[in-house]
Image (spheres, grey):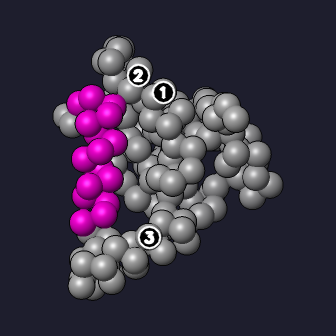
Amino acid sequence: MNTQEHIVAVVEPSLDGEATIEIARKAVDGGARATVVVLVSRGTMSDIENFAESESLTVPDASEIYFDRLAETYSNRIGSRERVDVVTESAYSGRSVFEKASRVGPTTIAMPQRLANRRAWRSSVASADVPVLIAPAPAA
């Protein structure tokens, strides 16, 4: 039996998610599935709070709109809504993200080099049950 490739791409919206999104796009172009795990940082929450204030929305309503738009953007960039799922993760630990990623049955996890180099993430990368593809840092 041939298993379908399923890549999990870890991204941070305002930082360096471009490389992992490109890796996911190429995998989906080749017939794979993709799950994008969006890390919600303090900066992201600050952006959502500013959006809520500027649009006279509650923070939960603004969050829903923000993440729906983000999911649509990532799905469109990767190229197939049928084969792409986008989930958010507010816990900012490597262990939590890898636990969430492992629940979707990935064959590969792609993540930015900057995250993989963090002390708190190294053990999760080293002990992952599937290969971890480290996306290079963006060129300066």
Dot 1, crowdedness within 10 Å: few (<14), some or many (≥20)?
A: many
- Tell which circle, 1 or 3, labels the residue nearer the N-terminal end: 1
According to the picture, the residue beneath numbered tag 3 turns out to be 47
Q: Residue at x 41, y 20 (%)?
A: 26
Judge from the rendering whether residue 28 lies leftward or rightward of residue 38; answer left or right: left
Prevailing secondary structure class for the magenta stretch in the rendered image = helix
Q: Residue at x 41, y 22 (%)?
A: 27
Dot 2, crowdedness within 10 Å: few (<14), some or many (≥20)?
A: some
Check whether the beta carbons of the residues at disc 2 and disc 1 lie within 8 A of each other: yes
In the image, 61 versus 126, the foreground residue is 61
Residue 49 at least partly seen: yes
Vertical placement of 52 versus 21: above or below? below
Query: Which region of the structure is painted magenta?
Result: 65-80
3D distance between C-alphas at marks 3 and 2: 30 Å
According to the picture, the residue beneath numbered tag 1 turns out to be 23
Q: Nearer the viewer, mark 3 or mark 2?
A: 3
Vertical placement of 54 versus 132: above or below? below
